[in-house]
Amino acid sequence: MTSHDLRSQLASLTTEAFRPELAGIDQLPTLEIARLMNGEDAGVPGAVAGQLPRIAAAVDAVAERMTRGGRLVYAGAGTAGRLGVLDASECPPTFNTDPDQVVGLIAGGPAAMVTSVEGAEDSAELARRDLDALKITPDDSVVGVSASGRTPYAVGAVEHARALGALTVGLACNEHSALGAAAEHRIEVVVGPELITGSTRLKAGTAQKLVLNMLSTITMIRLGKTYGNLMVDVRASNAKLRARSHRIVALATGAGDAEIDRALTETGGEVKDAILALLAGVDGPTAARLLQESGGHLRAALAHASG
């Protein structure tokens, strides 16, 4: 693609549109600029709401594959890639997932998290290599993330993953995007032109973060990683999380501190096991067995214990 072709393509994108009414923004008082930004951001959830049926369909498809042992992989460049890495990195402490279960790929590798890696986002071949290193299978799900919906790295990742039989999702912020067309599940959240022309770390980035939150969180709910709205698979890796684990068991069971401490000790700090032990009146090993037989779903284990 020539430089002229790329300029023409960018000029046609909603996310790149220039807003002449904001041309004097740099001359406004700081508070007025803040009000403008806040007003712009307020419209993002509504744009996401318009894509909820597509988001839900993608979640159900991802969860079905992860139940079979598949992985959730995000692939993007720049801000989009960083958001994917962020969402993936938060799954182990929140849901006690294996670090390899939800993976974030960013064009240019880990170094691109903090600095620009020139040319990486333009390489579909780089995306193919990154996916091949993960040995993608039909049980995996690959989500390409790109505000423009045209980034070669994200589009290339989705095209390659689909050719390998994996589930594919295209998350973009422009309609009729190449990324959406390449994926089995198209999610296009159109938030409109940015306050600062082309700065898609703003509204587009916020929209992508909201959608990624849904994809990972609701998938984990479907996988039994929560009990109601409690994070019963939380990994107690520090003092704050140990205190949170104790509180979660208390909220789920109503048990006293001494009972909770005993249950957590007996179950090796596993919140879900401790809740089951207390609610079903079983010991730690029995709780672990019931949960394993129930695929990690606490409600199913409780039903089995009481039945």
Image (cartoon, helix red, strand yellow):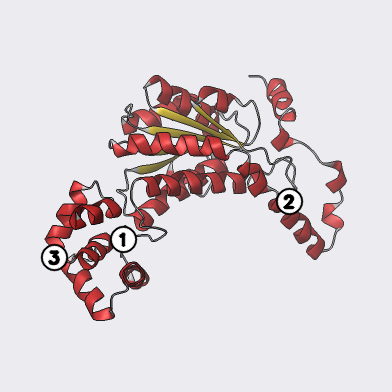
In the rendering, which numbered label is found on residue 43? none
Quarter assignment of residue 284: bottom left
Q: Does the image show residue 91?
A: yes
Q: On the rendered image, what quadrant is the C terminus found in?
A: bottom left
Number of other residues with Cα within 10 Å of mark 3, as a class: few under 14, some 14 to 19, many 20 or more: some
| Residue 239 locus on image (x, y percent) | 33, 73
Q: Which residue in the structure is indicated by mark 2?
A: 40
Q: Residue at x 32, y 30 (%)?
A: 139
Q: Which residue in the structure is indicated by mark 1?
A: 235
Q: Residue at x 69, y 41 (%)?
A: 191
Residue type at mark 2?
A: Glu
Lateral position of residue 243 relative to residue 116, left or right: left
| Residue 106 locus on image (x, y percent) | 47, 39
**SS label for mark 2:** helix
| Residue 63 locus on image (x, y percent) | 38, 39
Residue type at mark 1?
A: Arg
Q: On the rendered image, what quadrant is the N terminus found in?
A: top right
In the rendering, which numbered label is found on residue 283? 3
Lateral position of residue 210 relative to residue 69, left or right: right
Lateral position of residue 61 relative to residue 148, left or right: left
Tell me how far mark 1 sits from mark 2, CA to CA: 37 Å
**Mark 1 or 3, nearer chain start:** 1
